Image: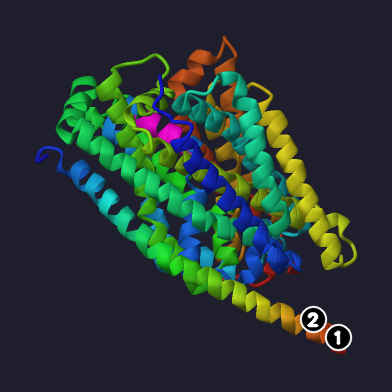
Amino acid sequence: MTKFNWLLDGSIVGVYLLATMVAGLMVRRYVGKVEHFLVAGREMDVYLGIASLAATEFGIVTCMYTAQNGYEKGFAGSTPGILMAVPMLVVGLTGFVIKPLRDASVMTIPELFEKNFGPRIRWAAGVVIVLGGLLNMGVFLRTGGQFLVLVSGLDVKYLEIMMTALLIGVAAYTILGGMLSVLVTDYMQFIVMSAGLIVVTILILISVGWANMVTTVETHYGAGGFNPFINPTMGWQYVLFNLMLNTAAVLTWQTTIARVLAAKDTNTGRKVYTRTSFFFVCRFLIPGVWGIAALTTLGPMANTLEAMPRYLSNAVPPGLMGLLIAAMLAADMSTDSSYMLTWGSVIYNDIMAPFRKTVWSEKKGLFWNRSIIAFIGVFLLLYGLWYPLKGDLWTYLGVTGTIYLASMSVLLIACCYWRRANSWGAGAAILISAVIPVTYLVIEQLPSTAGLAKSIGPYYSGIATYVLSGIAMIVGSLLKPNSSGDLREGLA
Amino acid sequence: MAKHWFWWFMTMACVVWYSTITIYVTIKGGADIKHMLARLDVIREREVSEEKEG
């Protein structure tokens, strides 16, 4: 039984949805060029950037998995948040990679690759980014719908219809207003999302109590519930893999990098990174606390993913429930709009680059960008919502993420700081970072090799992908004979 | 609290920092949007007048 009140909570959610849609649609009149559509005319300032980055990087899917981490691993489950905040802060303070990237005035990462590695690598990088990104995003809608259905007490048969309507609304303002609509709606969504997250967390801390949560974690996980190095499901390999994964995400995840590219200058982009860095601790720890509260209140459950929403459906009172659902809708809508726009930008800017032999008019460019976002919306509906995903979701997200992040981070660092880096090295790095995770997934699925996969584990496999991808870049680049094309000046 | 001070400190830091930054970003972010749209308006008007002249 949920505490969702249709009149009170439904009104709060309705007002939020209406205000967002109106704001998103209103700014469409400012979009006259492709640059306005994809990077908001590079006019974004620091605080709008912070709101947009924070809102984009926190979706319902994030909340579900980070809460699950808290439920299954205790406080130690929030370690990835710290492991993302530290690289974010360091990159923001030093300008590592993001400075040369923003200074190059490109609209996407593969566009930068063309300068050092040629058009083929640009195209291949675009394909890897879009495949990794879209397959990753493919599970967002269903997971988000599961949360909303569980918390609001809606009949599960309405999940598809509800999420389809939500996606159509998000797609409408993203298609019309591009990055400008994304930024303005992200700002509103950041406020609603943050208010909901903070109020619910304070409510939980007061009602469940810190001492009870600590005792629960001690009882179920011992010292490993507080220290990732001695947690039997984590260990140093978990910490190292997450450090590599999160550093790569900070440097290359298209939705994160889009804020640097939309910033009005390089310093603004760096400030957005520096000042948003601690948000990534909150991003893991706040839902982690919700997960621990679920464990304290409900005890062990078979479906650990559903523990947190089931707990919230009874713990949050009417009125606040409306704020919570509006907050989670805000989190999901900001993520969906930004993801559709940024993956669409790579399709237009890089994958379609070979087809743009002549300069396209702004009108034609805008038409194609809008069409691509509409196609992505249709893909998300078919793949992510109406097609039920089989298998383990974590492995799925890890594999699709690593294929992208390992190769792109190696290519980007080499592109910015190593003059000897060339297309052979880039091609080898892309190949290696695709082969290892996919091979691991295959041997994990085959009954005859499943034992081997289990003994290796996903973290060692992930670490190997990053290390070998780097080695492939070095070896491949050194093997290619020197030519005038390879001696182009580096970017840094 | 004393035994697991690190996670207590991090949790409290999250609540305090996040509350503060939300208020701050709400105020300053609104001003950022206003300035961004004003700048885009100026650019658009300049481009329209250039097109007319051209």
Tell me the number on the disc at residue B52.
1
Which quadrant is home to the C terminus of chain A? bottom right
Magenta stretch bounds: A62-70
**Left or right, A287 with reference to A26:** left
Report the front residue among A448 and A80: A80
| Label 2 sits on residue | B48
* Residue A471 appears in the figure: no
Which residue does the image show at 53% across and 47% down from the upper left?
Answer: A15
Q: Residue furthest top?
A: A447
In the rendered image, the vertical position of residue A303 relative to residue B35, given as above or below: above
Q: Mark 2 belongs to which subunit?
A: B
Q: Mark 1 belongs to which subunit?
A: B
Tell me the number on the disc at residue A274.
none
**Place of residue A481 in the rendered image (x, y in percent of width and height, measured from the top left):** 71, 58
- Residue A363, by quadrant, is bottom right
Which residue does the image show at 14% across and 32% down from the upper left?
Answer: A211
* Magenta stretch encompasses residue A65: yes
Do the residues under discs 2 and 1 have CB atoms within 8 angstroms?
Answer: yes
**Majority secondary structure in the magenta region:** helix
Circles 2 and 1 on the same subunit: yes
Label 2 crowd (10 A; few <14 / some 14-19 / many >=20): few
Q: Amino acid at mark 1?
A: Lys
* Residue A173 appears in the figure: yes
**Place of residue A144 in the rendered image (x, y in percent of width and height, measured from the top left):** 53, 33
